[in-house]
Amino acid sequence: MTTATSKGPGICRFCRTPLRHTFVDLGMSPLCESFLRADQLNEMEPFYPLHVYVCEQCFLVQLEEYVSPEHIFTEYAYFSSYSESWLEHARKYTEQMVGRFGLHGGSLVAELASNDGYLLQNFVKRQIPVLGIEPAANVARVAIEKQIPTIVRFFGMQLAAELAREGRSADLLIGNNVLAQVPDLCDFVAGVKILLKPQGVFTLEFPHLLQLMEGNQFDTIYHEHFSYFSLLACEKIFGAHGLVLFDVEELATHGGSLRIFGRHAQDSSRPVSSRITELRAKEDVYGLSGLDCYRSFGKKVKQTKRELLQCLIRAKEAGKTIVGYGAPGKGNTLLNYCGIGPDFLDYTVDRNPYKHGRFTPGTHIPIFPPDKIRETRPDYVLILPWNLRSEIIEQTSFIREWGGQFIIPIPEATVSS
Ligand SMILES: [Zn+2]
């Protein structure tokens, strides 16, 4: 059952400063993965605020914890191994890390939120010992079946201390797309400090706040993501725990991510790369070290909403039909915030069979298999997973046979044929 754990405007998850400045207020929204069955449509749905703040002290952009992580993660529906491109990403990463840090049969590679073992299996193939830590029992079970040692628990100081006592400290500690979902950030980062060997390295990947802001990707904000990181905020958070970021890579994943490389502050064997200073300067030029830049983001988001609605209203008034493509989590932030329901979209389609016959949370748009588009020949197809737009436009190019066009909502509403 969902639990509301919030009691008011709150304090910063990292530095405990009272949160007073709005980054963006996306109104009330249901949990983005709670797709409804037909028999649930007349039931009450819980809505929670999607009000994001920025801390005036450390510039961590954050959402209050309205929903307990136990609720979100104990039975997690996402299996990393279902995504071919993500598997390839993991293979390349392994190759790069083994080469760069000289990992061998005597090393230990630990991964936080190791999911179904999609990444660690690459190290196992090279006879490098691994340890997965994954709180979602159902995905952890898949990893264990693949002979990947996995502990089914949430990571923090306590678990890190237990493992360190058992002599299971890490030479390489990995956390991909987990940092945003950590409610107690300080406990998590303190755990990283404890579990890392004196000469150990950690790498973390997460969506980059600068990309979110530059690309107007407000729909990547949802209740399951508590924090949104810049390099600037990360350096403060890790620095406060005796850790130094010595390298960074900008990746194309999830609309633009960072991969940060960290080590103990005392370990001078790895000098800080110029890529750190360059990215720090880039964020500074953009304005991430001052409040104004964050506070103007909400204005841009409201304008995007008006423009998208204008585009849809014009189409409807001209008697055109519009449908959606995709039912991703982020689509639900967009649909709920903009108030786009079946009055605009006749339906949406998705390739995931779990979603067929279900309805989008809050907006109640029916979800069908992709073939529905060919049957009903809509005038417009609104692409909800805009990060996959080239792939979707290519697969759905047949709508041109009847003059159909695509609408891409982000960074601003554009129509393309
Ligand atoms: Zn703060």
Image (spheres, rainbow, N blue to C red):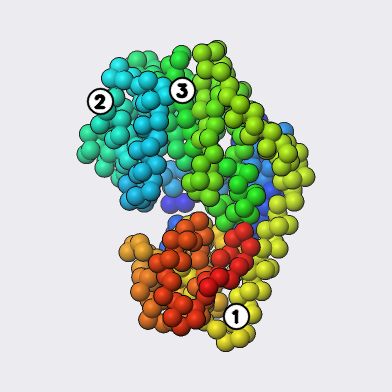
Query: Which residue is at the front of the view, 19 or 252?
Result: 252
Crowd around label 1: few <14 · some 14–19 · many ≥20 (10 Å): some
Q: Amino acid at mark 2?
A: Gln
Say left or right for 76 vs 2: left
Total marks in image:
3
Q: What numbered label is drawn on residue 48?
A: none
Q: Position of residue 97 (x, y in %)?
A: 40, 28
Q: What numbered label is drawn on residue 201?
A: 3
CA distance for labels 2 and 1 = 58 Å
Q: Amino acid at mark 3?
A: Val
- Does any portion of residue 37 appear in the rendered image? no
Q: Position of residue 188 (x, y in %)?
A: 50, 30
Q: Amino acid at mark 1?
A: Ala
CA distance for labels 1 and 3 = 53 Å
* Residue where numbered disc 2 is placed: 127
* Residue where numbered disc 1 is placed: 315
Picture residue at 69% right of the left edge, 48% below the top:
23
Crowd around label 2: few <14 · some 14–19 · many ≥20 (10 Å): some
In the rendered image, the vertical position of residue 98 relative to residue 348, given as above or below? above
Crowd around label 3: few <14 · some 14–19 · many ≥20 (10 Å): many
Say left or right for 35 vs 208: left
- Quadrant housing residue 111: top left
In the rendered image, the vertical position of residue 342 relative to residue 354, given as above or below? below
Picture residue at 25% right of the left edge, 25% below the top:
127
Give SS at disc 1.
Answer: helix
Give SS at disc 3.
Answer: strand
Q: Position of residue 285 (x, y in %)?
A: 73, 39
Picture residue at 67% right of the left edge, 68% below the top:
307
Query: Which residue is at the front of the view, 367 or 18?
Result: 367
